[in-house]
Each structure stands twice: as C-alpha cells, then as structure tokens.
Image: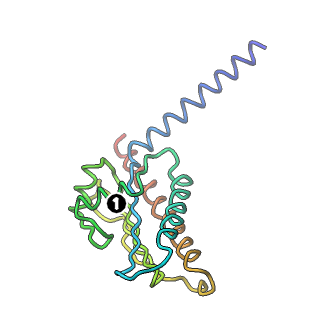
Amino acid sequence: MKSTTRVLCVLLLLLLTCSIGSAAAVDSNATAAIALYIDTSGHYVPGIDLLNKALNEVIRFKVNAVLLGSEVQSGNEVLRDLSRCQINTANDATPQALSAYSDARHVNYILLLSVRPLDVALDVKAYSTSSSSYLVDKTICRPDGTAAMSTLDTLSAMIGNEVTDALELIRNSAASVASAQN
C-alpha cells in the first residue's frame, strides 16, 4: 500500500512539474489580445448585440481549444485600450499604434477581427510585436455554399475557422521565438 502511494505521489509530482514547465514556456510568449469589431458602416442593424455576444463566445471557445494555458485578453477592455491608442476599427490599425498598445498592455500578439454583417465579410489582422509586422492581413468574403445559412451561422463559421488558423500561427510563432531564446 505504501509503495502504491509513493508511486502515485511521484507520478503526480512528475505530471505537475511537466505541465507547469510547458505552460510557462508557452505562456511567456503567447500573451495575446483579441478585439472584435462589428462594422455596420453607420447603418442600423437589429440584433447586433446578439451577434457580438455569439461571435465572442465562438472566439472564447477557440481560444480555450487552441491556446489553453496562455494569457489572452479580449472583450470591451481590449476595445477601450485600443481606442486610447487611436485604433477604433481594424482598418485604423497601424504598426506604430499596435506597438504602442502592446507596450501599454504587455502583449506579444494582437488579433483584430472586423465583421461586416451587411456584406457577410470578415477582415483579419494578426500583429506580432516581436517582428513588428502582420502575421495575417486578409479579407474573407462569404464562402461558396453558405447562401442557405443564416448570417450568424456563416459569420460564426468564418470567425471560427479564421481565429483557429490565426491562433495556431501565433502558437507556432511563440514556440519558435521561445526556442530561439533558449
């Protein structure tokens, strides 16, 4: 009985040590901020608050699935801090303004998502402060075969796919930066 307890304690200690070490390595380089903008071009669109909540839930789910253990900032606080750096939409983002934001908030990556529900389009920008450049800068239009889907379903799928791709790129970039530092 004592030997079984000792073995379990050693295995538990080993498991905790490995998980803490690997989480620390990823965490130090994978601090990110994610901002979701809903661009209606000044038009009144009913249900924007529900769309915003639904898309933020999709983003949270993808962050938890891809960057578990990393520090990710999102929501209204990120939008407020970005506006203090003169970034009010994804199109306003310049490398200088993003660098100012990253210095103020201590993040290494900034992911800007701008949804245009009237066009069913999405602008994606992922910025790396270590390289002072965009990892991703693209516009995605409604994919073929989604005409029968609701706007919410289409935008959720688009956000889900693009956020996953961008977060994977950030995770791989953070891993390569961490290995270069060691």
Left or right, residue 27 beside residue 96: right
Quarter containing the N terminus: top right
Question: Which quadrant of the figure has residue 27?
Answer: top left
Q: How is the image coloured?
A: rainbow
Q: Name the residue furthest right.
A: 1
Measuring 33% from the left and 50% from the top, which residue is drawn there? 107
Q: Compared to 26, does 110 lie above or below?
A: below
Quarter containing the C terminus: top left
Q: Compared to 35, does 103 lie above or below?
A: above
Residue 103 position in % (x across, y down): 25, 50
Instruction: Give the total number of marks visible in the rendering.
Output: 1
Q: What element carries label 1?
A: helix
Question: Which quadrant of the figure has residue 171?
Answer: bottom left
Measuring 30% from the left and 73% from the top, which residue is drawn there? 91
Measuring 49% from the left and 40% from the top, which residue is drawn there? 23
Residue 44 position in % (x across, y down): 41, 81
Question: Which quadrant of the figure has residue 115?
Answer: bottom left
Foreground residue, 17 or 92? 92
Q: Which amino acid does label 1 sit on?
A: Leu
Q: Compared to 20, does 9 lie above or below?
A: above
Residue 172 position in % (x across, y down): 45, 55
Residue 72 position in % (x across, y down): 43, 50
Name the residue tied to disc 1: 79
Left or right, residue 139 beside residue 106: right
Foreground residue, 14 or 160? 160
Foreground residue, 68 or 113? 113
Disc 1 crowd, CA 10 A, few/some/many (<14, 14-19, 20+)? many
Left or right, residue 98 beside residue 27: left
